[in-house]
Image: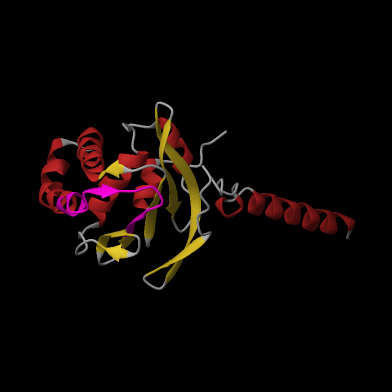
Amino acid sequence: MPHTLARLLTGLLLLLATAWLSPANAAEPENPIAGVRFDPRVNLGGQTVPLVATGVRAQFIFKGYAAGLYLGKPAGTAEAVVSQPGAKRLQMRLLIDVPMADFAKAFRLGVERNNPPDVQQRLAERSSQFVAQLMAVDKVRKGDTVNLDFLPGTGLQFTLNGKAMGPAVPGDDFYGALLKVFVGEHVSDNKLRAGLLGQKS
């Protein structure tokens, strides 16, 4: 009998340890970050999606925007972020005024750096559609909120301060390419990438 009880207690302790180390109990994302507080969860297409990571885009001494990544669960690699099913959101909260042409340039460069030529060709028409939506804005300003949402069956919806800036750009492959601009192997800001992958020290 004592041996049975010991085995039960050992099994219970192992179960508790496994639960504690699971992604659901991962460290909370830094919130607020750069003076910006993100909603801890959002509703996307009827699905509640939690904030799993945050980061700041900086260049030299200037902080351009704070970013929050909403996924079903934390993901520590670009592949895990891209392949995770369900609704997703990348939210950017502007800390300075930025010409939208800068975002368009960064998007095109990021897609080129993180995808082979055949994938770029497959995405070309949709990339042009998205860039046209960006360029129609002209400039984003300090305090603005940009949401890049993925809704399964619909695609990427780009909104500025809650207003949709055009029709959804279809395809989970396109949204994956967009996410790689921020978390792929070849990015413009490695600290932002680390933050969005939950790798901050």
Horizontal arrangement in the rendering, residue 16 relative to residue 146 (left or right):
right
| Magenta-colored stretch includes residue 156 | no
Q: How many marks?
A: 0
Here the colouring is: secondary structure
Nearer to me, 144 or 198:
144
Any part of residue 85 in sight: no
Classify residue 108 by image quadrant: top left
Residue 91 x %, y % = 39, 53
Nearer to me, 29 or 65:
65
Classify residue 5 by image quadrant: bottom right
Q: Residue visible at 23% across and 51% down? A: 174
Residue 105 vertical position relative to residue 3 in the rendered view, above or below: above
Q: Quadrant of the N terminus?
A: bottom right
Any part of residue 127 in sight: yes
Q: Quadrant of the C terminus?
A: top right
Q: Residue furthest bottom?
A: 46
Q: Residue visible at 45% across and 32% down? A: 191
Nearer to me, 65 or 21:
65
Q: Residue visible at 33% across and 59% down? A: 149
Horizontal arrangement in the rendering, residue 32 relative to residue 106 (left or right):
right
Q: Residue furthest top?
A: 60
Horizontal arrangement in the rendering, residue 140 relative to residue 47 (left or right):
left
> Which stretch appears magenta?
132-149
| Magenta-colored stretch includes residue 135 | yes
Residue 193 x %, y % = 41, 37
